[in-house]
């Protein structure tokens, strides 16, 4: 398999937050990793469009790796085998592949960095 890797440098001022990601209550700033890695990885910063206290519903992501680092605000979620957790600025989370979870609520100022592999994956309600 040929490795695709390109140099990537992005300044926040040149890449605004845009709608159109996995969830309509977030906007996303793409960090250029999809193109740089030929689709092997995605990295973005997600920002709440509004606060939320309505659960997303229990779901799983069909991916190999998911990492979240909270930059600002807070998020409460429930993870199978763990229970309910509240993540605040400075919290990092690795959710194992296929682990059912549900976002319960988050602040209106929530921002988080998310890394996934592969870049494109399915989300399935359970």
Image (spheres, rainbow, N blue to C red):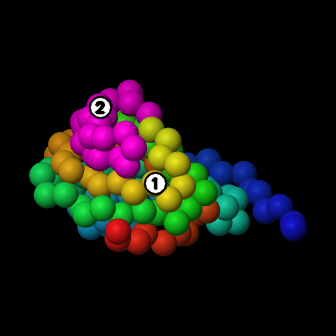
Q: In the image shown, does 111 or 61 lie closer to the viewer?
A: 61
The residue tagged 2 is 88
Q: Residues within 10 Å of mark 2 (few under 14, many from 20)?
A: many
- Whether residues under marks 2 and 1 lie with C-beta atoms below 8 angstroms apart, the answer is no
The residue tagged 1 is 99
- The residues colored magenta run 73-92
Name the residue located 47 percent from the left edge and 46 percent from the top edge. 95
Name the residue located 27 percent from the left edge and 52 percent from the top edge. 103
Q: Is residue 95 magenta?
A: no
In the picture shown, does residue 63 fall above or below 20? Answer: above
Predominant secondary structure, magenta span? strand
Residue 9 image position (x, y, % from top left): 62, 48
Q: Is residue 80 magenta?
A: yes
Provide the secondary structure element on which disc 1 rests.
loop
- For the C terminus, the image quarter is bottom left
Q: Quadrant of residue 88?
A: top left
Q: Residues within 10 Å of mark 1 (few under 14, many from 20)?
A: few
- For the N terminus, the image quarter is bottom right
In the picture shown, does residue 69 fall above or below 11? Answer: above
**Numbered marks: total:** 2
Please indicate, yes or no, whether residue 17 appears anywhere in the rendered image. no
Q: In the image shown, does 120 or 49 lie closer to the viewer?
A: 120
Q: Is residue 67 left or right of residue 34?
A: left
Mark nearest the camera among 2 and 1 is 1
Provide the secondary structure element on which disc 2 rests.
strand
Residue 54 image position (x, y, % from top left): 13, 58
Q: In the image shown, does 5 or 89 lie closer to the viewer?
A: 89
Name the residue located 54 percent from the left edge and 55 percent from the top edge. 97
**Residue lying farthest top?**
90
């Amino acid at each position: 398999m040929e490795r695709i890797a390109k140099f990537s440098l992005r300044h926040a001022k040149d890449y605004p937050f845009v709608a159109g990601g996995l969830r309509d209550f977030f906007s996303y700033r793409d960090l250029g990793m999809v193109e740089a890695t030929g689709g092997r990885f995605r990295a973005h910063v997600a920002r709440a469009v509004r606060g939320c206290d309505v659960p997303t519903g229990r779901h799983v992501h069909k991916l190999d790796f998911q990492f979240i680092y909270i930059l600002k605000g807070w998020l409460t979620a429930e993870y199978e085998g763990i229970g309910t957790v509240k993540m605040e600025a400075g919290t990092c989370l690795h959710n194992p592949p296929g682990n059912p979870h549900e976002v319960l609520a988050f602040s209106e100022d929530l921002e988080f960095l998310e890394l996934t592999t592969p870049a494109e994956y399915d989300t399935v309600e359970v």
